[in-house]
Each structure stands twice: as structure tokens, then as C-alpha cells.
Amino acid sequence: MKELISEKQIKSRVKELAKEISDKYRGKTPILIGVLNGSFIFLADLVRELTIECEVDFIKISSYEGTRSVGTVHLLKDISADITGRDIIIIEDIIDSGLTMNFLKTRLEGANPASLAITTLLFKKEVARLNFMIDFVGFEISSEYVVGYGLDLNQKKRNLKSIFRIEQ
Ligand code: 5GP
């Protein structure tokens, strides 16, 4: 494993993202929807840097086994909140192929929120197939498999403080 993004870099970028989000949603109370499991650390750090009111909810889906996408998305746990007429921000750890985000966006938009924005800590922009913009991006990375700061390798390594790439 080789360190790709240090703890210090993550902290500073999370603060910047929180400021951007706070500025954009000033006077509003968005619901941040964390995509489990990978986003739990990012979401926890991000909300503590926000200077606006917010609510937090979670959705759980699966598309990966080990280091490979299985190509289909399954909903494992739905949100609890009623998001109709609310400002929604999806909080994702990483966008790779875009399969998950396409699924999530379509599904959540079906409940008619007032607005829907997407935040991702990591974005594999070169490989992602999306026909919409990502509103808040932490870091753009190449298409390597990364772990740490919530991101797993077979459910392990999520507790690492920095982000590492796996060297084959
Ligand atoms: P996508 O649907 O965009 O291909 O992938 C999104 C999901 O796949 C992420 O939420 C994450 O769970 C998983 N994933 C994609 N790339 C990586 C990676 O490099 N490392 C880890 N740990 N998970 C990844």
C-alpha cells in the first residue's frame, strides 16, 4: 500500500468543502444522505465543519465485491427521512464507474426533493460515466483501487487515517 492522500490533506480539503456547502446552503437545512458504508468517516468529519443547520440520514447499497464492481446495484437500506420538498445532499466516498451515483440520483429524485446535490470525496473522473455534474468534489484520482478513511478492502482498512492505493 502506498499513501496517496495524507490525513492532513484530507482534513484541509474537508474543511474547504464544508465551507463551500455552508456558503451555498446558508439559511437552509439540507439533509445530508451518507452512502454506507464507505462515507461514514467523511460524513462525520464534514458535518462537524459545517456552519449551517443540517440533518443526517443514510442509504446503503451494494455494487462491489472485493475490488470489483458486480455491475448491478442493490438497495440494502433505504433512507428514513421524508425528502419531498427538502434540500438533499448525497455524500459519497468515491465515484468510480458512476453506476451507484446514477442509481442513487434517479431514486432520490423520484421523491421530489426541492434540490439534489452530490458531494464525493474522491472522483475517478476519467472512468466515471455520468451525464450530470458532481457539485462538490474532494479530490480527482486516477482509476486505481484505494483504501482508508472509510474505504475498504473486503470490509477491512476503513479505519486508516490516510488514503492509500493498493499496489499489485
Ligand atoms: P461506482 O458505482 O461508481 O463504480 O462505485 C461506487 C462504489 O464502489 C463506492 O461507493 C465504493 O463502495 C466502491 N468503490 C469504487 N472504487 C473504489 C475504490 O477505489 N476503493 C474502494 N474501497 N471502494 C471503491
Image (spheres, grey):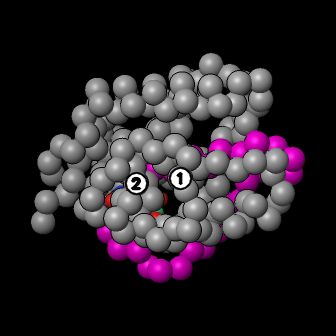
Q: Amino acid at mark 2?
A: Phe
Q: Which residues are magenta?
A: 66-93
Circle nearer the viewer, 2 or 1: 1
Q: Which residue is mark 1?
A: 134
Q: Is residue 150 visible?
A: no
Place of residue 115 in the rendered image (x, y in percent of width and height, measured from the top left): 75, 48
Given contact means CB atoms under 8 Å apart, are the residues at marks 2 and 1 in contact? yes
Left or right: where does residue 15 sit relative to residue 25?
Answer: left
Ligand 1 - quadrant of the structure image = bottom left
Residue at disc 2, secondary structure: strand
Q: Nearer the viewer, residue 77 or 26?
A: 26
Q: Residue at x 41, y 74 (%)?
A: 69
| Mark seen at residue 123 | 2
Left or right: where does residue 73 sit relative to residue 24?
Answer: left
* Residue 82 is covered by the magenta coloring: yes
Secondary structure mostly taken by the magenta-highlighted segment of the chain = strand
Q: Residue at x 75, y 61 (%)?
A: 109
Is residue 86 placed above or below 98 in the rendered structure?
above
| Mark seen at residue 113 | none
Q: Residue at x 36, y 44 (%)?
A: 139
Place of residue 140 in the rendered image (x, y in percent of width and height, measured from the top left): 34, 50
Q: Specify the quadrant of the image occupied by residue 160.
A: top left
Place of residue 112 in the rendered image (x, y in percent of width and height, measured from the top left): 84, 57
Q: Residues within 10 Å of mark 2 (few under 14, many from 20)?
A: many
Give whichever of discs 2 and 1 has the lower sequence position.
2
Q: Is residue 148 visible?
A: yes
* Residue 97 is covered by the magenta coloring: no
